[in-house]
Image: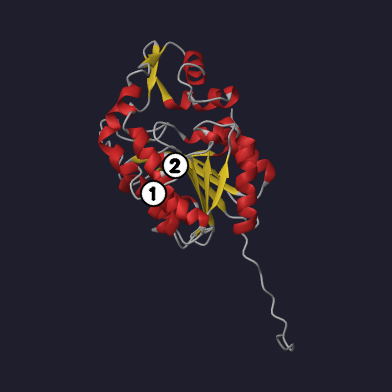
Amino acid sequence: MSFISSFQSSLERGDGLVFNVYNKPAKNDEGTLVLHHGIGSSAMTFALFCEQISKINPDLGLLLYDARSHGRTVFKDPEHINYDLSLDSLVNDLEYVVSQMVSSHEKLLLLGHSMGATVVSNAAAGVLKTQVKGLIVVDAVEGYANQQLRSMSSLLLTWPQSFASLDDAVTWHLTTGHLLRNAESARISVPACLKKEGDYYSWVLDLKTTKKWWDSWFTNLDRWFLSAPCARMLVLPGTIRLDTELTRAQMQGKFQMQIFNDSGHFIQEDIPRNLAECVSHFWSRNGHPIKVIPKFGQIRQ
């Protein structure tokens, strides 16, 4: 059982969508870190990261969930076939979960990985902007992501449709698939992306069926990230060429950038402790406004 599993609950919405949620309440007005995973993944991708950041900052609240059609988030009616993975639907889901699980007065730190970065950036620049005090994007750059999506169809053809066992699935992610580098994390995150069908384990979400949304998932990511009225950080694995807009903004000091050369795409899984320290330092600098105590009776110089 992972650390975050002890905070697991379910949240049913009026349309019958039942979110699989993990919520660790904040203490001492520390605020809540809201995490959104990427496409094809699940909340369990953040399991080890959550454990590490809770050791560093025990008062920080944590809120994460499986997005629709991912992990253990399902429609109550098994006949329901609403398969809408548009950005608007994902942002609306985020807003709903936050509104139900966190006080409207609580300050938020949003972190999104890959496609989840567009979801949290959109929300930070829009529906949640009054609460959000910090925004972190993990391995998502608009131009680079859209370029990678052009080869997604051919890449998915090399992926197995099913696995004989969970151990086989974990091994594939660590070796042949080259998706993950941390075996401990893989043993937690991989099973959450699979479902048992007969004698085999197949993907909860078949990524090939999501192609019609690919062009929209990263569109306007840069604009939303830079327009969010809060502190911002971009976390990347190694040197990735930034878009012109991001390069200009980075040179102007409009956001912090952190590069981890010893990680792959899933930074939160490959090096959870390093990312936890990075996020904790970012929040300690930006999540606590300086309290200015006026000194009455003195003449300002």
Q: Which residue is mark 1?
A: 221
Residue 121 position in % (x across, y down): 43, 51
Looking at the image, residue 30 lies above or below residue 203: below
Could you classify mark 2 by the number of other residues whose Cα lies within 10 Å: few (under 14), some (14-19), or many (20 or more)? many
Q: Nearer the viewer, residue 43 or 12?
A: 43
Q: Residue furthest right?
A: 298
Can you see residue 128? no
Residue 152 position in % (x across, y down): 33, 28
Confirm or deny contact between disc 1 and disc 2 (CB under 8 A).
yes
Could you classify mark 1 by the number of other residues whose Cα lies within 10 Å: few (under 14), some (14-19), or many (20 or more)? many
Residue 195 position in % (x across, y down): 40, 22
Looking at the image, residue 173 lies above or below residue 165: below
Residue drawn at 27 percent across, 33 percent down: 211
Q: Quadrant of the N terminus?
A: top right
Residue 183 position in % (x across, y down): 58, 22
Disc nearer the start of the sequence (1/2): 2
Q: How is the image coloured?
A: secondary structure
Q: Which residue is mark 2?
A: 140
Q: Amino acid at mark 1?
A: Leu
Q: Amino acid at mark 2?
A: Ala
